[in-house]
Structure formats: C-alpha cells, structure tokens
Amino acid sequence: MTDIKTAANPLFLREEELRQGIEMLFFAYRDFTAEPDRILAEYDYGRAHHRVIYFVGRNPGLAVSELLEILQITKQSLSRVLGQLVREGFVQQKAGTQDRRRRHLHLTPRGYELERRLTETQAGRFARAYRAAGAEAVEGFRTVMLGLINERDRARFEGRGGERPGVRAPRGD
C-alpha cells in the first residue's frame, strides 16, 4: 500500500514539496557543475566560459548576437569571456559570407577537446540518473524542466523537421 504522506500528489503540491524541489535543484546544480568547475580551474576559467564553450560547440557557426540571446548576459560580459577564449585558442570568429560584419563562432580543435572533457562528465551524470529513473521518469523530468524554462526558449527543445532538438546545422551567415 502506498504511503500517502510520501507519495507526491501532482494535483495538490504542498509548500514543503515545492520547497524540496527547489532545494533539490540547488544541490543537483552544485553537483552537476562540480567536476566541470575543477576542469575549468585548470585554465583559470569560470562557468561563463563553460557556457560559451558549450553553446558554441553545440551550435557551430552561432552568431554572437544569438549567443547573447541564449546566455542573457550583457555584451560587455560576453566580450570579456569570448575575448579570452579567442586569445587563448579555444574559439575562433569568422565573418559571415553575406554580411561580413556578422561574426560567427566556432570551436577550435583545442576548444572541442575542452568542450568534450566538460560535457563528458555531465553527460555521464545524466546517463546514470536516467538509467536509474527509467524512461517514464525521464519523460516526466523533461516535462518539468520545460515547465521551468521561459516560454520563448522552450521552442529550442521542440523537434523541428527531424532535427535533434537544440541543434542547428552549421551556418556561414
């Protein structure tokens, strides 16, 4: 028999259940970023560097303006981080083919290696958790995460014409 006190009721979520979800998200994020933080420290980088490397690696040819939109940071903040990644050989900027003023970002081989190291640790953590939870729970997790993301950004995760969600073909402009 199911213990009603411990089973979450999706129709009536008590404040304690909501607070526990918030707290679990804090702990999950801390642990999810711990190993990448150690890797980033080898380069004297922080999480902003990680986000740039991840999204440029995930979207080769990403325009600087698109990266600003994804990260929701100021041009000044991005300029500092991106400038360092370019100077140190992790990211390269290429002019657009149609609009030479538009800059597109690509990881260098060194950038791909760092992105692989960072993502490998996090993908392993997700794989273990997904395996332990099972397919139904994974779909529930995806639904909850989509519910936490603002409506405008949810479209990034909806399949478009057979593409993998969140991935676009490389662009030159």
Image (spheres, rainbow, N blue to C red):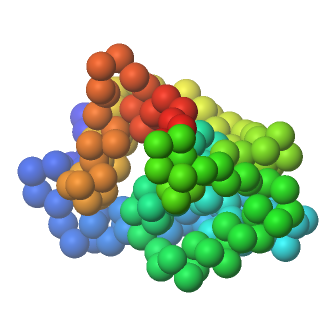
Rendered residue at 62%/34% (across/down):
128
Picture layout, residue 160 above or below residue 15? above
Does 20 sit above or below residue 2? below
Q: Residue furthest right?
A: 42
Residue 79 sits in quarter: bottom right
* Residue 142 appearing in the image: yes
Q: Is residue 139 left or right of residue 125?
A: left
Left or right: 21 as drawn, with respect to 86: left
**Residue with the most extreme bottom position:** 76
Looking at the image, residue 150 lies above or below residue 57: below
The x, y position of residue 32, in whole percent, is 62, 56
* Observer able to see residue 62: no
- Which of 122 and 11 lies nearest the eye of the viewer? 122
- In the depicted view, which residue is nearer to us: 21 or 163? 163
Write the residue at 85% across / 73% down: 44
Q: Give the residue drawn at x 17%, y 60%.
A: 13
